[in-house]
Image: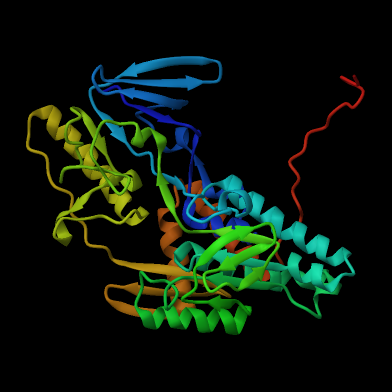
Amino acid sequence: SADIRLLAAENHLTYNPLLPEVVGASVLPGHVVAPLRQMVSRAKVHQVQVTAIDTAAREVHFRAGQESGSFGYDHLVLACGSRANLHMIPGMAEHALPLKTVGDALFLRNRVIARLEQADLTDNPTLRRWLTTFVVVGGGFSGVEVAGEISDFLTASTRWYQTLEAEPPRVVIVHGGPHLLPELPERLGRFTAREMALHGGVEMRLKSRSRAIDARGVILDNGSRIDAGTVISTIGTAPSPLIESLPAEKTRGRLRVDADMSVPGLPGAWAIGDCAAVPNDRENSAPCPPTAQFALRQGPQLAANIARRERGETTRSFGYRPKGLMSAIGHNRAVARVYGINLSGFIPWLLWRGFYLLYMPTFARKVRVYLEWNWAMFFPPDIAHLRFTRTIDETVNDD
């Protein structure tokens, strides 16, 4: 008997863990999104932009094109996620490329291919070196995975660019910590650095922080510079403006919620995912990290708690002990810590792919990605530069 409405700016869910593979042309862009209407059967889906939430009147205001309106609510679930913070480093917003959306991944893929085309055309060795240098700021999961994908893509693609065979493109990771993947044991981080350097030629600038980014490249905290035609940012997140506007207590930009994921002081409001600091009952009530592994479990638990609240029953605290962490590092290799066991090499790479395939939304997407992965193992990547331009009649509006 409940009237459930799902409000989202896009009519699809983006499977963010595979965005680096879109950059490296391992999968097609359409394979990492799933239409919301095909995922939910008992909710009404509305592609709208939420403009404000009136918590006193319990109303959500929205805009859709030229139309605007509002919905009243008894229960409001906030799952707004987070957005890229492009203001952590001077010049980042103007000169660095983020990787948070399918559009970001497509733009970055086109940038990589465009740089190869430009480098193949020039006779200036200095300019060619600049065009084919790619700097990734951040050595966490996202940074390592996108650097590995770009490195693999460049290795497989340069045979079609004869002028680049003598001087291969350059991929550099700039990371402030002593080893890559700080969420994993140091041994795995050091293994990652060795493997990426050996098989992909990726350079590491550890214990180095980016002081500024400009049109020519990255300036490090020690005063040195890396000239690069492309800088990718994988560090920093910022809360959604909608979350910032709510009259509720925040913890480092995330909504502070009770153990059952309800928002204190906002009757009927709940929050999960990256936008909420959900206490983990299995980890001494420490806030859950903003990862999909936790958000996937928070959703069903919150739905059950709302049903309990409607029945007048006691809600339950959220608790989950993570199974482990995995990261692809390029060249059909991965590192993982699963149930306390450290793994590295080809086997964890298969586990990494199997895990993500398991949680890929909709059966159709699972099949498509599985076939695409197998195709990519035997055939070269697609190096087509996709220009999303429209045909325009130049005779119109000549004045």
Relative height, residue 8 to residue 69 (above, below): below
- Name the spot of residue 198 as percent of width and height, x first: 59, 85
Relative height, residue 289 to residue 40 (above, below): below
Image quarter for residue 311? Answer: top left
Left or right for 396, reference 185 = right
Answer yes or no: is residue 114 visible: yes
- Name the spot of residue 341 as percent of width and height, x first: 30, 79
Give the residue at x 85% y 73%. 163
Foreground: 231 or 27? 231
Give the residue at x 37% y 80%. 186
Task: Name the quarter where the N terminus is drawn.
Answer: top left
Foreground: 232 or 141? 232
Image quarter for residue 275? Answer: top left
User: What colour scheme has been applied to the protein in the rendered image?
Assistant: rainbow
Give the residue at x 63% y 53%. 95
Left or right for 182, reference 27 = left
Total tally of numbered discs in the picture? 0
Answer yes or no: is residue 379 visible: no
- Name the spot of residue 361 as percent of width and height, x first: 44, 47
Task: Name the quarter where the C terminus is drawn.
Answer: top right
Residue found farthest to the front: 223
Relative height, residue 361 to residue 54 (above, below): below
- Name the spot of residue 240 as percent of width and height, x first: 40, 39
Left or right for 218, reference 38 = right
Foreground: 309 or 39? 309
